[in-house]
């Protein structure tokens, strides 16, 4: 996709170029940065919601695994769905990654940079 | 209001259909999901800001009460006010529910699905 | 700047008129309200991104200092950049205030009231 625009925020996979930590911990509370579907070259991995969300969730899984956690440790989620029309699909896919008891969650729309369709950040709890 | 659109996100009252927990706890920190003015049928309870905010705040009160808390235990609030013009009314109504010392707060605009005028989530602290 | 609009949300510097605490603490976790570049009269301090962001970061520094903290204690940041085009400048300026290990971070766009170009809130950890 040569016409895919560069992602100017790039809070996806360009950790080396961005002033953020993917994970910061305080006690057993773990704060995880916003994840989006941007590859190592700063390109969107897909022009479609499902492709972006699946890629993003796999990146989030990797981030969680990196500190010994998985989706079951997440207690709070913030989701950013660019287009309201994608919300039913978002909820459907969401259930493939999270199971009961679900995290507390807030979902908002229309606040992502151009071309980004989904972003997610979360707070997890380390087992003591 | 037969023409009221269904709320596609429905992070209001349709708990049974949504993959979220209204409350998740970690130690004495309590994370509360985004509350909006959507009734059990997925309809907006009012086309006006005040009606939506009052309904939402009563739902939030119920959620807090359900885990033995009330508004005085809330330490951080995120509010989503769809229309900037409603912010003075939002601040006025807000003072009917919260009292000093107020929670830390951030308020943003223009990021709710169509028809939703107000949403709020928060973090509360359980007394030890 | 006589034409500068009043800031209707005014979660900047008008603490006395707003129902919020700039800081709330729970254990060693410190929640900090959204900071914006609004002066004590409710006016924007600058019509430009850099002016607003620098002013805001200095206010945030003051808030942190007020509870014995500084930027190195911040573990999670939420930034609101109104215009996507300002994100490169945002990241550049951000590095003047935060250093490694950077906080976890999420940045969203297009959700600020008219005239506000930057807002930031954060969670910090008090040294024990």
Image: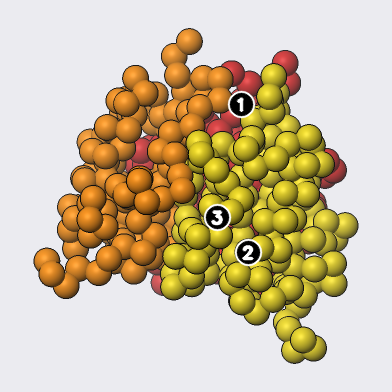
Chain colours: A red, B yellow, C orange
Please say if the residues under marks 3 and 1 sit with CB atoms less than 8 Å apart: no
What residue did someone put label 2 on? B53
Label 3 in the same subunit as label 1:
no
Q: Quadrant of residue A74?
A: top right
A6 vs B70, nearest the viewer? B70
Disc 2 from disc 3: Cα separation: 9 Å
Describe the element under mark 2 as helix, strand or loop.
helix
Disc 3 from disc 1: Cα separation: 29 Å
Pointer 1: residues within 10 angstroms few (<14), some, or many (20+)? some
Residue B111 percent coordinates (x, y)? 53, 66
Disc count in the image? 3
Query: What residue lies at 44% left-to-right and 69% top-to-bottom?
Result: B84
Q: Residue furthest right?
A: B16
Query: What residue lies at 74% left-to-right and 55% top-to-bottom?
Result: B59
Write down the chain letter for disc 1.
A
Query: What residue lies at 61% left-to-right and 77% top-to-bottom?
Result: B48
Please say if the residues under marks 2 and 3 sit with CB atoms less than 8 Å apart: no
Above or below: residue A125 compared with residue B82: above
In primary-sequence order, the first of circles 2 and 3 is: 2
What residue did someone put label 3 on? B94
A94 vs A79, nearest the viewer? A79
Check the picture and name the quadrant holding the C terminus of chain B.
top right
Write down the chain letter for disc 3.
B
B89 vs A113, nearest the viewer? B89
Q: Residue furthest bottom?
A: B3
Q: Is residue C79 visible?
A: no
Query: What residue lies at 44% left-to-right and 65% top-to-bottom?
Result: B88
Q: Is residue B8 left or right of residue B99?
A: right
Q: Which mark is in front, 3 or 1?
A: 3
What residue did someone put label 1 on? A29
């Amino acid at each position: 996709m040569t016409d895919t625009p560069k992602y100017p925020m790039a809070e996806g996979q360009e950790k080396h170029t961005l002033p953020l930590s993917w994970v910061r911990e305080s006690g057993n509370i773990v704060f995880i940065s916003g994840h989006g579907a941007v590859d190592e070259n700063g390109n969107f991995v897909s022009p479609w919601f499902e492709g972006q969300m699946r890629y993003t969730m796999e990146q989030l899984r990797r981030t969680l695994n990196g500190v010994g956690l998985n989706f079951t440790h997440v207690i709070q989620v913030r989701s950013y769905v660019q287009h309201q029309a994608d919300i039913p699909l978002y909820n459907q896919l969401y259930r493939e990654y999270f199971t009961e008891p679900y995290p507390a969650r807030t979902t908002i729309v229309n606040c992502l940079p151009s071309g980004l369709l989904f972003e997610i950040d979360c707070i997890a709890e380390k087992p003591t």
